[in-house]
Image (cartoon, rainbow, N blue to C red):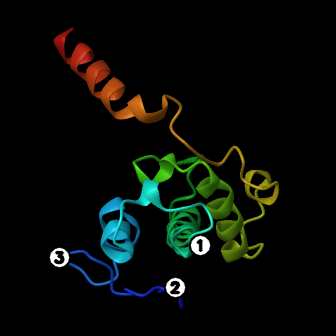
Amino acid sequence: AHPDDPSPRGFCPYHDGCLEGLASGFSMENRWGQKAHLLPRDHPAWEIEAYYLAQMCQAAVVILSPEKIILGGGVMQQAHLFAAVREKARALLGGYVRHPAILEGMADYIVPPGLGVHSGVTGALLLAERALR
């Protein structure tokens, strides 16, 4: 848990300290008493949020070695969060992974969905279209 997190167990009804319970919009609202998009950019919530998401990215890199990490959803609509997540993930990796995508700052490695907020709906429609054919 982040040392400044006022709710280090998170808000998942099933698991203590799981990512969804620590970093989702629901958890942010429960932790801070208001929706994430209403929190100012300099609110401590964003430091804590970036920390949890960076831990997830670091784990994904060393376990799965993905070609790219795409972070979407409501919380990730805060564009400033991407730079913080990249920076913290790179620090957590500590030079362990020597891939250029990671060593060069991860601007093209940890990214938002290519279709923005419409990625989920567009993907669902494309899958439905494919199923109909």
Is residue 14 among the parts visible in the rendering?
yes
Query: Marks 1/2: CA distance?
Result: 9 Å
Which numbered disc, 1 or 3, marks the residue that appears first in the sequence? 3
**Based on the displayed image, in which of its 4 quarters is residue 126 positioned?**
top left
Secondary element at tag 2: loop
Tag 2: amino acid: His
- The correct choice, above or below, for 127 with respect to 119 in the image is above
Extreme residue toward the bottom, this view: 3
Residue 47 bears which disc, if any? 1
Q: Position of residue 86 (x, y in %)?
A: 67, 60
User: Marks 3 and 2: CB-CB under 8 Å?
Assistant: no
Residue located beneath label 2 in the image: 2
Q: Earlier in the sequence, mark 1 or mark 2?
A: 2
In contact (CB < 8 Å): disc 1 and disc 2:
yes
Read off the residue under disc 3: 13
Question: Which callout, 1 or 3, points to the residue nearer the camera?
Answer: 1
User: How far is mark 3 from mark 2, CA to CA?
Assistant: 20 Å
Q: How busy is the neighbourhood of tag 3: few (under 14 within 10 Å), some, or many (20 plus)?
A: few
User: What's the amino acid at mark 1?
Assistant: Glu
Q: Secondary structure at mark 1?
A: helix
Q: Is 68 rendered above or below residue 128?
A: below
Query: Is residue 10 shown left or right of residue 89?
Result: left
